[in-house]
Amino acid sequence: MDAFDVVVIGSGPGGYVSALRCAQLGLKTALIEKYNTLGGTCLNVGCIPSKALLDSSEHFHNAQHSFTEHGIEITGLKANLSQMIARKNEVVSQTCSGVKYLMDKNKVTVYHGLGSFIDAHTIQINGEQTTQITGKNIIIATGSKPNYFPGMEPDKKRIITSTEALNMTEIPKKMLVIGGGVIGLELGSVYARLGTSVEVIEFAPSILPTMDAGLGKEFTKILKKEGFKFHLEHKVLEVKNKGKHVELKAENKKGEVVTLEADYCLVAVGRKPYTDGLALEKAGLDVNNRGQIEVNEHLQTSQAHIYAIGDVVRGAMLAHKAEEEGVYVAETIAGQHPHINYNLIPGVVYTWPEIAAVGKTEEELKAAGVSYKTGSFPIKALGRARASMDTSGFVKILADSQTDEILGVHMIAARAADLIMEAVTAMEYRASAEDIARICHGHPTYSEAIKEAALAATADRALHI
């Protein structure tokens, strides 16, 4: 029976990054993955494939709606969904192969099969062959799977999850999306750009309910212009596959039952931790009422040598959060003293324009009784935005009223996913709004909106509005 310093169960962003860092630190490391390819949900049926389709659909949308104004004339424009899916699959294949290369390069031993605890140090791997290995330390990184509530159970035919939405064989005429969060809006955007009529059903009073309220309000306006319809404060009662269409019944805030029909219904109400098959009880572990593995501030379970990271533990279900935790655990095992500031893990929505945020929302600051000031700047006031015809959105900076320290940054803008890192960096060093306001930003760029918002927050003196 092979023995390892560290055994990592799950090869998603948290698991494979943790395995890499363990190997870099000189620890004999094994990685267990139940599927044939490495990379987990993110690389195979999540982050990477969805971004590939988002980019393809955005190219088509631009060709259809803005190329003429740019002086580019096209005839016979047509969306080839099968080619988009094929390109997406190639991107996924290349990315997953890259992870395998990294495992080989760093001498991480990879096992394919379902990993289950025999005891607190022994893992049985049920693959093509049954193998048992031991780990002095074990890291659980088994991720999550799509969630759903009673009445909206996916059949993976007409009532689908994000996994099936990434492999459609036709462009629907109409699609219902249950859930106005990140997954629903991203995948809804893919098909809306290709000509699908998209209607979003959301239980909360606004879309993106966990983000700053200003973002949801502004993005609703943007999406409505693109043809989205919204049914907010609607509770889904049931969804039924009627053969060639789906029928959804929901109750609105007045108590009235509304019936909606479409070709497909995408269930996008978040994700839930995935621990099936681990046999946690044999290691002396259990899950809480949310299906999460409980951990302490060092990400240790009730068994000190067993750690858990990513979607199976508390916190935001984000690939980059899982990566940070993977590195944290690896360095902890190696005797180092790493640190994670969970307040500074950015959240991103990869629609167009993109949405990104870090730190506290206005609602959180109000609830905590923190005295703050705000500075906002509209993207349409940027020369760079007008030049590229990406003029929707804004940047908002929240700063402490007394100290001017930046407490939160929220933005809707082209390339917001990249722009947010200026804010993350500044906040990591506890910068003030004035610090950003006095930094020279290149012109013309989108990043100037961050400087202008900082100027507005510092002394209400943005220059270009």
Image (tube, rainbow, N blue to C red):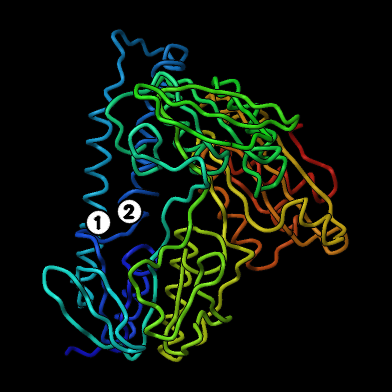
Q: What label sits on residue 59 in the rendered view?
A: none
- Quick one: quadrant of the C terminus? top right
For label 2, the residue is 43
Task: Residue at the far left: name it.
Answer: 129
Residue neighbourhood size for the residue with mark 2, other residues' Cα within 10 Å, grouped as few (<14), some (14–19), many (≥20): many
Identify which residue, 40 or 133, lies in the foreground.
133
Q: Is residue 358 above or below residue 34?
A: above
In x, y percent, where is residue 371? 87, 58
Residue type of the residue flagged with mark 1: Cys
The residue at the point 72 percent across, 58 percent down is 435
Left/right placement of residue 116 relative to residue 242 reads left
| Residue 350 image point, x, y percent | 49, 41
Quarter placement of the N terminus: bottom left
**Image coordinates for residue 260, horizontal then vertical, percent:** 54, 23
Query: Callout 1: helix, strand or loop?
Result: helix
Kind of element beneath mark 2: helix
Q: Earlier in the sequence, mark 1 or mark 2?
A: 2
Say what amino acid the circle numbered 2 marks. Answer: Leu
Q: Give the quarter of the image for residue 36.
A: bottom left
For label 1, the residue is 96
Q: Residue at x 26, y 53 (%)?
A: 95
Kindly tell me whether residue 26 is visible in this rendering. Answer: no
Tell me if residue 448 comes above or below residue 385 in the rendering. below
Q: Tell me, yes or no, whether the two marked residues, 1 and 2, touch with CB atoms within 8 Å.
A: yes
Asked whether 158 or 237 is in front, the reply is: 237
Residue at the far top in the pictured view: 75
Mark 1 and mark 2: Cα distance apart in space = 7 Å
Q: Position of residue 406 (x, y in %)?
A: 73, 59
